[in-house]
Amino acid sequence: MALPDDFKAALSSWASGVSVVTTNANGLLYGLTVSSFTSLSLDPPLILVCIDNRNRFPTMVTEAGGFAVSILARDQEAASNYFASSGRLPTPNFTTIEGEWTEAGQPAVKGAAAHIVCKLHDQLQRGDHTIIIGEVVEARTDDSKMPLLYWKRGYRTVTT
Ligand SMILES: Cc1cc2nc3c(=O)[nH]c(=O)nc-3n(C[C@H](O)[C@H](O)[C@H](O)COP(=O)(O)O)c2cc1C
């Protein structure tokens, strides 16, 4: 098999949701788009995301001790593109994409289909990514929102 192209092509067949993980480390806000969000455990309530080791997010989460996951709604492609663009720097305020504060003091994307707020549980560096495990302290859902999906390198949604 001609890895890694065959590997990437196979992975692109996996339809996923699109989320933005955000954190507030010493008053600096930062986030990035991730499709690697997964539920891990119900008791205790744990979730995980896998983040490229070159990204500043794992270091910032260690400093912050927590983070939020915003599960994007289908009208939030602009937020996904913004938080996937290269070279964004941490900022003291929300910029470009409207944000809101969770009760636990983490920044999140406004208008998302759901928010999950976590306390940092563990971080494991494996290969070129870091698995960040969060213990869920807050979860909120807007049932009126349809999800944004990612499949075969493009945005999709569900039709119901
Ligand atoms: C739909 C989608 C899903 C993504 N999922 C992940 C992911 O799970 N983990 C990750 O590290 N990067 C993921 N990325 C890429 C990051 O969002 C992107 O590399 C990062 O925001 C670039 O910022 P930087 O160059 O400043 O590090 C994804 C991008 C898109 C568009």
Image (tube, rainbow, N blue to C red):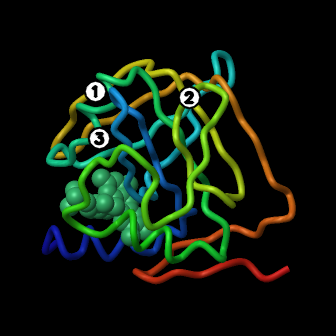
Residue in the picture at 49% in, 48% down: 37
- The image shows residue 125 at horizontal and vertical percentages of 21, 31
The quadrant the N terminus occupies is bottom left
Residue matched to label 1: 124
For numbered disc 3, what is the local secondary structure? helix
Q: Earlier in the sequence, mark 2 or mark 3?
A: 3
- The image shows residue 114 at horizontal and vertical percentages of 70, 50
- The image shows residue 57 at horizontal and vertical percentages of 29, 41
How far apart are the alpha carbons under marks 2 and 1? 24 Å
Amino acid type assigned to the residue bearing label 2 in the image: Gly
Amino acid type assigned to the residue bearing label 3 in the image: Phe
Up the image or down, 41 lies above or below 54; here it is above
Up the image or down, 63 lies above or below 16; here it is above
How far apart are the alpha carbons under marks 3 and 1? 13 Å
Residue matched to label 2: 105
Q: Quadrant of ligand 1?
A: bottom left
Q: Marks 2 and 3: which is nearer the front?
A: 2
